[in-house]
Amino acid sequence: MLEDDKSIPVRVALRCRPLVAKEINEGCQTCLTFVPGEPQVVVGTEKAFTYDFVFDPTTEQEEVFNSAVSPLLYGLFKGYHATVLAYGQTGSGKTFSMGGTYTSAQENEPTVGVIPRVVRMIFQEREKHTDCEVSLTVSYLEIYNEEILDLLCPSASKDKPSTINIREDPKEGIKIVGLTERQVMSAHEMVGCLELGNSARTVGSTAMNAASSRSHAIFTITLEQSDNVVSKLHLVDLAGSERQKKTKAEGDRLKEGISINRGLLSLGNVISALGDESKKGTGFVPYRDSKLTRLLQDSLGGNSHTLMIACISPADSNIEETINTLRYADRARKIKNKPVVNVDPRAAEMKHLKQQVQELQVMLLHARGGIFGGITMIFTCAILFLLPHPQTDQANEKLQTLTFLIATLLRKCLLTAAADKDSPEAFTTQHALRQAQMSKELIELNNVLALKEEFVRKMCQNDSHLEPMQTEHQNNIKSLQTSVGSLQKEKEDLIQALQSAKKDVNQAKLSEQRRKRLQELEAQITDMKKKLQEQSKLLKVKESSVRSVAKLNHEIQAMKTQRVQLMRQMKEDSEKFRVWKNKKDKEVLQLKEKDRKRQFQMVKLESDFQKQANVLRRKTEEAAAANKRLKDALQKRSEVAEKRKDIHYRGMEGAAGRVKTWLLNEVEVLVSTGEARRHLQDLLEDRKILAEEISQLKQQMEAGERPAAKVRVSGVLLIHVYVCICIDKHSHVMSYGFPPRSAQIADLQQKVLDADNEGRLKQRWDNITTMVEAKCALKVLMSELVSAKTTSSKLESELKQEKSNVLDLQKTLCDERKLMSTMDMEHQHRLVELEQMHQEKVLYLLGQLQSEESKSVEKEQEEETSKRERELLQRLKFQVCHTVLSTTVHNNILAECSSGSYS
Ligand code: ADP
Ligand code: MG
């Protein structure tokens, strides 16, 4: 029945899952290369492993099943036991591959794992086997802490201690007493059992992954054919194969750790024993070492087809565990590596790096604009403050470019501010212009007023001169009029006399006389009338002059009112300006305060940056040193190994020397491996942080946030870039990439890999063959131990000393800080005082100004008002000058004080 009595090799399928989101976020890189067309995987740059199947991250579940699992099922129906073991570290995809989280909702999904597919196929196969009856039973158990839990009857095994026992029946083989074995009629029913058990596995522990990483789950399908052929298929989801940390494992966890190790270890030994052709038939197979191996005993024997699905993560952060898995799987199925044409991973990496360098340079440019261009930021703030409607997009864009663009912005800002009516500068200018305009108006008004008043005065003066003349004129007129009247009378009399005389010729002579007299009189009358006209003309002139004086006086009054109004307006305007200025001054003070804080932050940021940069530089140097040390140790080891082969060397050196050299070198290798591992861990952690920051930055960039915000998060990134640039500058070596530090990580990992070569551990003690050698080794180790302990205690006391020094320094620092804060308080106090003094001065000046103004209004009535006002204006101007001056001085003092406190 069995086609091969000698050996049935354990077949190994290597399955690498894709990088998961967490690994991508942490900046992990793929450290594996898959050789196309070959079942081969290359770790790092040179270490290659070959298996029966190698499934790269793109492989679907269906392919895994069809190519690796389904052949086992044909054997099952032929009567072979079959086993599928999923092996690998926690999170490598064991449960995913086996289908250990299957629910019926996923029935037709391509992500369905091995077990549901097996179930489907078994029932399909059974349909084909119409010739005989096939009955199927399933059981599902979990081994946790070397205890068996029944997953198909979880309540029974949950509270009570396990009643399940393993018995070995000479006829039936291994029997598990007390385990639920459920007979199933359909695929649906069988899958139901799987689901039930899966949920029990979840329910049975608080944190699924925590428990599943420590327990083995075995889903067993027993196929009983009518011809008494019973074959079993074990589908095993093993516990996480990661090394249990030697430290901090206590109590239950330690127990767990040990039991898992025991299960996996003995499984490994069993697999080795079964797989080792040379030991076949003679070697002892240690099934009884653990429950796991005992349970799998009858399917791991000669008549079982066994497939190990070795699950691995491609992430470089998991490289050590991945290599452990690869070795474990390799032991299970040793196949000679075939040399293949490799896709050169270095060239690909180089291309990737170059691209990332470019990205980093762009980022650096942006970041520089933030950290080193702090002033830029302040300017930008100023610009944004000055412009009520900044052209945000444009400003943003410009901010992100170089410094010369910032100058452009500044220039632009100044221009815009000047054109903008709402800016404080413009407001001040306008106020000054307004005041100047009003002052000018006032002066002009005063001039006109003075002229008019002068004119009125002159007119009044003339009037007073005219007054007596007027009376005289009036008198003259009167007398003239009287004279005219009497003359007229005389004339009429004469005319009458003349008429009567005509009749009397004798009176001719008299008549002649009378006529003459008449003529005289008429001339006199005309003369008189002329004079009279002149006089009345004069009087009219006088009247009009009085009228115009009255008009002028009226005008003067109006102008005076206007002047009072103007002065009041000036006063109001000044007051308004004063209030506005006070407000603005306060705002400016606040801004200055903000600016001061920002500057302080910047200084702090820079010093943090320097500190971190130093730490990173140190780390980088240390990592390089560890790398070198390991390299040297390895070099020496191989030299010693070479020498040892030399018989002359053996003869020349005594056992003591030989053992010593070998031991010390071995210790050095181990120590430097440890160191390298530590630095590796550090680098991985660094990269994680950097990757997180970068992704944060990217998100922010996509969200279109301001670069200022970017600066905040990019501290470490910047430092990384800085360090890289430094390295680049000094060594001209491109030792950085993206995600950062990956190259360094890969390098260190390669070294650790070399040092940790398989077989070293086993060979290590093969060097000691005789008691003498053992004694020598002990002696060497003893002296090493003593010197190490001495050094350690010396270091410890030094450390203690340093710690107390640090404490002292901290105390001093604390004192200094206190002193500084008192000084700062004093400084603030002084600042407030200065401010108060300044305010008082301004108030006093304003008060004076006002009283002078009111006084001047009162003195309007006085004659020399205009002169006085001119004086007052002079004084006003002087005082304004003084105020401006004192404000400037005050501001200067403020500026000096604030810069002084942080310089
Ligand atoms: P394990 O059982 O080994 O601890 P899991 O099977 O739980 O690991 O897998 C860890 C994570 O990786 C899960 O989120 C799983 O979905 C995912 N995963 C594992 N293998 C693959 C794969 N081949 N393709 C896609 N995702 C996978
Ligand atoms: Mg799992």
Image (cartoon, rainbow, N blue to C red):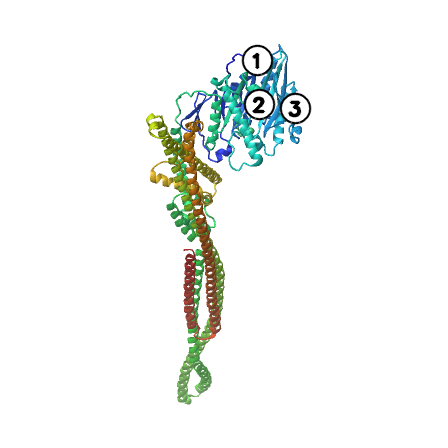
Q: Nearer the viewer, mark 2 or mark 1?
A: 2
| Residue ranking furthest to the top | 131
Q: Nearer the viewer, mark 3 or mark 1?
A: 3
* Residue identifier under label 2: 294
Check the picture and name the quadrant holding the C terminus: bottom left
Q: How many marks?
A: 3
Determine if residue 746 is in view: no
Q: Quadrant of ligand 2?
A: top right
SS for callout 1: helix
Q: Between marks 2 and 1, how big is the CA–CA gap? A: 24 Å
Mark 2: few/some/many CA within 10 Å (<14, 14-19, 20+): many
Specify which label sits upstream in the sequence, 3 or 1. 1
Mark 3: few/some/many CA within 10 Å (<14, 14-19, 20+): few
Q: Position of residue 246 (x, y in %)?
A: 51, 35
* Residue identifier under label 3: 178
Q: Position of residue 25 (x, y in %)?
A: 49, 35
Find residue 279 and name its label: none
Q: Give the answer, above or below, for where 213 lies relative to 787.
A: above
Mark 2 and mark 1 in contact? Answer it, CB < 8 Å. Answer: no
Find residue 78 and name its label: 1
Q: Give the answer, above or below, for where 6 lies relative to 898.
A: above
Q: Nearer the viewer, residue 87 or 58?
A: 87
Give amino acid for label 3: Gly
The answer to whether residue 190 is left or right of residue 66 is right
